[in-house]
Amino acid sequence: MSSSYRDLLVRQRAIELMIELYRCTSRFPNDELYGLRKQLREVAGLLLTNIAEGQKRPSASERKTLSMAMGALPKIESQIQIAYRMSYLSHEQLLMILSKTGELFRILSGLMLATGKEPMASQVASAASASA
């Protein structure tokens, strides 16, 4: 692994996703201030936090935090699907975010395999459907 969590490609991609989610959710209606907007921003923050924590902990904890980071991705995908159906996101925004979550899933899967833990089959299925 890199000498610092700041150097990790997965961290850089998580930051890009978080920025995109902040941009998109800033256009949500005010009545979503404490609803969907807050939920999306929180889960994106947790994704980034778990990636950073995973780099700084021993192997078993690293796998746990990577697994938690991976678990954030279906939450983001589900919430953006709702935002899209509520017409808060364009189809283009939806596809861009799904592309970013799919890429993050692939990177996290590789990291988990490198640390000796395979992603769960349900997580693999989620990523496959997101990138389709």
Image (cartoon, helix red, strand yellow):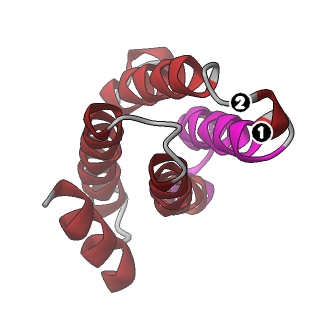
Q: The disc labelled 2 sits on which kind of residue?
A: Pro
Q: Which residue, given by chain and number where applicable, does mark 2 sit on? A: 29
Q: Which residue, given by chain and number where applicable, does mark 1 sit on? A: 32
- Residue at coordinates 36% horizontally, 59% vertically from top-left? 112
Determine contact: label 2, label 1, CB under 8 Å: yes
Q: In front: 65, or 127?
A: 127
In the picture provided, is 129 more to the left or to the right than 62? left
Helix, strand or loop at label 2? It is loop
Helix, strand or loop at label 1? It is helix
In the rendered view of the protein, which quadrant contains the N terminus? top left
Image location of residue 54, percent across then percent down: 57, 43
Task: Answer whether residue 37 is magenta in the image.
Answer: yes
Look at the image and give the residue range highlighted in magenta. 35-63
Q: Residues within 10 Å of mark 1 (few under 14, many from 20)?
A: some
Query: Which SS type dominates the magenta stretch?
Result: helix
- Residue at coordinates 24% horizontally, 42% vertically from top-left? 99
In the rendered view of the protein, which quadrant contains the C terminus? bottom left
For residue 22, say whether it is visible.
yes
Q: The disc labelled 1 sits on which kind of residue?
A: Glu
Image location of residue 16, percent across then percent down: 41, 20
Image location of residue 87, percent across then percent down: 49, 43
Q: Residues within 10 Å of mark 2 (few under 14, many from 20)?
A: few
Q: Quadrant of residue 3?
A: top left
- Residue at coordinates 48% horizontally, 21% vertically from top-left? 15
Q: In front: 26, or 3?
A: 26
Q: Quadrant of residue 123?
A: bottom left
- Residue at coordinates 34% horizontally, 67% vertically from top-left? 116
Q: In front: 26, or 43?
A: 26
Disc 2/disc 1 C-alpha distance (Å): 6 Å
